[in-house]
Amino acid sequence: MGGIHPVVVIWLVLAGPVWAAIGAWGLPRVYRRKGLDDSQARLVGGLGGLTLGPLLVAPLWYFTPELERWYWGGGPGILAALELYTLFAALDPDNLCVTNASYVANQVSNGLIIGFIYALMAVGLTLIYSVQGVISFCHGQFYMLGGYVSYYLLQLVWDVNPIVGVPVAGLVTMLLGFVFERLFLRPMHLGRIERAGEYAILITFGFGFFLQYTVLAAVGPFSQKADPYLGLGSFRLGPLNLIPNRLVAAAIGIVLIGALLYILNHTWLGRALRAVSMDKQAAAVVGVNPLTMNTLAFGIGTMLAGMSGAALIPVFTWVPWVGAPAATRSYVIIVLGGMGSVPGALLGGLIIGLVEALGAGCYPDPSKGAAYKTAFGLVIFAMMLLLRPTGLFGREL
Amino acid sequence: MSKKLLNLLLVVVMLAVLVPTALAAPPAQEEGQDYIVVADDWLSKLADKYLGNPYAYPAITHYTNQKHAEDDSYAKITDSNLIEVGWKIYIPSAAEAKAYLEAPTVKTVATGEDTIKIGGVGPLSAPGSVVGGIAMKFAMELAVKDINEAGGVLGKPVELIFADTEGLPERGAAIAERLITENKVVAITGEYHSAVGLAELEVCHEYGIPCLFSETWSDKITESGYPEVFRIAPASSMTSRAVVDWLAKVGVKRVQLIAETTDFGIGMAETQKKLLEGMGVEVLDTIFIEMGTEDFTAILTRIQAIDPPPDVVSAEAVTGETSYNLEQQMAELGIAPTEKTIGIANQVAVQPEFWESVPNGNYFVFTHVGLPPTLFNETTNKVADAYRAEFDTEPPSYALEAYDSLWILADAIERAGTTEPKALINALEDTDIVLAQGRYWFKYTSKNPLPTDGSVPAYMWHQWPDPAVLVLQYFEPNQPGMEAAVVWPEVYQTHGTPYIVPGTKP
């Protein structure tokens, strides 16, 4: 590439990383000096600096308006994405992501579909964290177990659509989750365990190993997969090349997340769960037993993990160690979306799905794009931790 | 959370800093002494205190037991991890301990043992290929049973000590070291992953113990040129050669490669690219993917946008369940195999679970190492029957190789008349024995060195020159792997055609 492209020069002068650093570093200080709420200042300053440079940072610095999260964060956020895309197009004009609209549409639709699938794995984890305050390190293994429960059920009962396995797997993993919580986590909530935080990590980690190797001993190391939901192959919808099997899995994800959101927001149980997650003592005062809610939350969390496993065993090949990478991705998603937030996990899943698809699809060197797939998601993750450590929907600390 | 992580990190850092300094303080005693065990003692602590080296504890065990034989006021230590308060033990002088610890290991290996110990290595847990490790362990145990039923070796039974390498090079090196120094094995055999094998062979070389690799394909294994290293699996270049020759015969022009980011995948992709380009075939790109990736739609959509479509999309250099996910998505999205594009799958496609994981997998082409069933001999059939009875699937080449590797070692020990490593290596070089995969021999050895002019590739050192590499193709859904059409090499062709166009029958 001869010299630097003029678009890059203009962008670097007018906006770009330097102004982003100035905005992210300086604005929170200005807000704090004036005694104003500075919680959004770093995010807005960083994104605003990146997109409009002094044009946005300077007035904010001077007028310090009240920053509402979605309005001030979302606008520059979308603008930043558009600007980066323009920049990318200017630097690599022959890239498929610039020249071929139907290619971009395909990548986006694939990214969104896999995003719903990712989100389904993550919501259970975030629910457990929000109520229990512990991160379950055996979440991936419950996910794996759910897949196997569904698989063996379908082996026993012939000629049934694999969708039937989803509720059954949910039931089994929920009961197992109840038992595990009652036996191993409740003593922690009753204050019988010293160093409860470390205990929770170790006991869930250990139980995860137990599940994984028990399943390995029981089913063997050979890979397995359930029959597809709907036919095989792919079909075309306008420019899109879609795999029906995945669409069903994504639809199951949407339905389950929708049901969970409904329960959390519109039923007594959901209100009780949210109350415990906000303040255990206050919840107890108004007649909600936090211990019961802990058990319920863990059980619902493991049920969601099991159901997502059952939803995906017709899509991906299953082995007893399939849970570990899925769980790792879920941790990234819930931190991105805000620990303990269900809508956050949904949005986080969609973002990771999209970023991975577009990253792998648009990275200029195709031989590396696929290998860096996970890394693209982690870049977004790292930026989020820098600009907004509580995540998209996180509670303020 | 972050504070706890920080604490954890601190502990790790402190351990890393403090442990070496603790080791570097040796107040070694001049003379041996009796010692009464008190609470909170353990042998390596005493070894550290009196001998200046925690790893010298076997010397305490040894001398205490020696004293016990003469005078039973001394305790008898049967397990170095278990001592009781009040026991009288003997802590040798630094000189005595040194003499014991530095006694040649060969001596302890060769005589006085009631079994001949052989170390087996392979992955039994993720991230290693568990399927591979379990199959190899089964086959090795079967071989040990058969060898012992046939009278053992040098009049003693063979004992297999199989250790899990988890597919991690650092684990492999540690395990090889443990097998050699602690278990006193006379040879190591097995291994599935090239990267792990490359770590293990350095340990074998360091201790001078023979290492017979049964399933690591990377050229670098035998390219090491170490006298201790032998291999009975094909080198990666040998299998690549078969596929490339076949592609040349079919007459393809443009090839898209997909490979995993491991020693095996990168090595295979590089060799194929070089060979293909040498024959004037264009290699579009080699796409590298991480092991364990489930969703490949992004990268496959990218391949789908190539216009005109490539003649071949090859997933041969991707292993395990990752390859199944990739192949199914390739077929599902209509990329390969199609009328225009040949689809090449990894060699695990021969397994029956291929059809469950890749229901769209008809017309995939794959390589298979080993003889076609028509050429099975008595041993092959025996091992195959036992394998089917246990796993209900056809024995993969790595199971047959693992079985054979134990017999090759047993045969060499018998001919050498000793387990002394040099004599054993010498005997291995003279191997000439017919087993489950055919007749084993090593062409380039210390007696027939590799020509120095480079006319023979370096990986032929201590390499079995004749593994059969077949190219197979499915032509019916749910077809058993061994019934797929052999399309290459021509001498083994079953349907008289080098390629079955998707949608047709041979």
Image (cartoon, coloured by chain):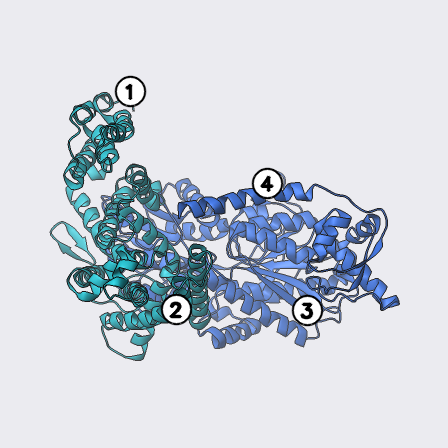
Quadrant of image for the C terminus of chain A: top left
> Chain letter of disc 3?
B
Measure the alpha-carbon separation of dots 1 and 2: 62 Å
Query: Which color was chain A given?
Result: cyan
Q: Position of residue B309 (x, y in %)?
A: 25, 47
Please, is residue A51 above or below residue A142 in the view?
Answer: above
Measure the alpha-carbon separation of dots 3 and 4: 43 Å
Residue A193 shows in the view: yes
Task: For label 2, count other residues whose C-alpha is less than 10 Å away and answer few (under 14), some (14-19) or many (20+).
Answer: some
Judge if badges 3 and 1 mark residues of a common chain.
no
For the view shown, which residue lies furthest in the right direction? Answer: B70
Q: Nearer the viewer, mark 1 or mark 2?
A: 2
What's the amino acid at mark 1? Gly
- Answer left or right for B232 relative to A163: right
> Chain letter of disc 2?
A
Q: Any idea which chain is the blue one in this picture?
A: B
Quadrant of image for the N terminus of chain A: top left
Q: Earlier in the sequence, mark 1 or mark 2?
A: 1
- Give the SS element for disc 2: helix
- In terms of image quadrants, where is residue A123? bottom left
Residue at image mark 3: B158
Q: Nearer the viewer, mark 1 or mark 4?
A: 4
Residue at image mark 1: A3
Q: How many marks?
A: 4
